[in-house]
Image (spheres, rainbow, N blue to C red):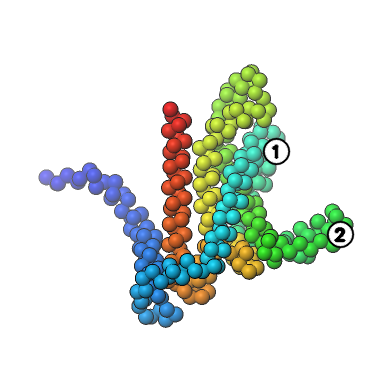
Amino acid sequence: MKRAFPRWLIPYTFLAPALVVLGMTVFWPALQAFYLSFTEYGYDITQPPVWVGWSNFVRLWQDNTFWQTLGNTLIYLIGVVPILAIAPLILAILVNQQLKGITWFRVAYYTPVVISMVVAGIAWRWLYAETGLLNQLLTSLTGQDIRIPWLTSPNLALFSVMAVTIWKGLGYYMVIYLAGLQGIPEDLYEAAAIDGSDNWKKHWDITLPLMRPYMFLVAVISAISATKVFEEIYIMTQGGPRSSSKTVVYYVYEQAFVDLEMSYACTIGLVLFIIILALSLIRLRLSSDQVTETIT
């Protein structure tokens, strides 16, 4: 008789192919990056790395550019996440109406999502040019020659790139909210109308409480995207001017592939991983407390 296959091995059998792929493409490179952060990896990649201990972390602590990029990343996070958590919900409520031609509005709002970030970045860079369409529009409205340096001013560059991230993400998160809105029974709104809760008040009383899980999901996804933003910075500003729009992920790229400081780039990546992990654990704790409070 054939030996019975252990039942506890069955799930791992199905997971094995994915675990092998993840091990080769994610886990093993992550372990290598962790090791390289404690070494000095020279320009000659044929030579093995030299163990230097905590030297890279001491250098990181004294690196003013790193602290500047970390501050830029936090500003990006604080500026983008609240808008992407609220504005798409308003759009979803608007396009959830049973109106003629509403499908075209949904397509129009979602179109930026399917546009490549490279194409979008180049287009917005043209719009942001001092002689671009945006400044020309402001000139025609005010009657004055306006040349705002959207991407060349240290005070405006980061916020100009943030606007592109928000523009491109509105449609994506709108679809998530739209799926949640269409799952709310219409009877609840009819009962609310009888109780005197109508128009926008019904959304305050019914929609917002029922959409809280979706808002949490959108906040988490948008926070992760804002933390690892790279394409917009690379295409539109290259981190300038004077590192005013440089984020931590772009700084990792710059150290690794421009300055060829692989070990130092791994050190920056490790610190960023620890920060994101800490924020994620705090967020998970708050969400679990929120769920417990809701149940009780």
Disc assigned to residue 267: none
Residue where numbered disc 2 is placed: 144
Picture coordinates of residue 64, whole percent (x, y): 54, 67
Can you see residue 254? Answer: yes
Picture coordinates of residue 120, whole percent (x, y): 64, 59
Residue shown at the point (39%, 62%) measured from the top left: 30
Residue shown at the point (44%, 44%) measured from the top left: 284
Q: Residues within 10 Å of mark 2 (few under 14, many from 20)?
A: few
Name the outermost residue toward the top.
194
Q: Is residue 271 toward the left or the right of residue 202 in the image?
A: left
Where is residue 75, by image quadrant?
bottom right
Q: Residues within 10 Å of mark 1 (few under 14, many from 20)?
A: few
Quadrant location, the C terminus? top left
Where is residue 103, by image quadrant?
top right
Picture coordinates of residue 161, whole percent (x, y): 64, 58
- In contact (CB < 8 Å): disc 1 and disc 2: no
Amino acid at the residue labelled 2: Gln
Alpha-carbon span between mark 1 and mark 2: 39 Å
Foreground disc of the pair 1, 2? 2
Residue where numbered disc 1 is placed: 101
Picture coordinates of residue 129, whole percent (x, y): 73, 64
When the figure is inspected, residue 196 is found, relative to residue 221, above or below; the finding is above
Whichever of callouts 1 and 2 sits on the residue coming sooner in the sequence is 1
Residue shown at the point (61%, 25%) measured from the top left: 189
Residue shown at the point (65%, 68%) measured from the top left: 241
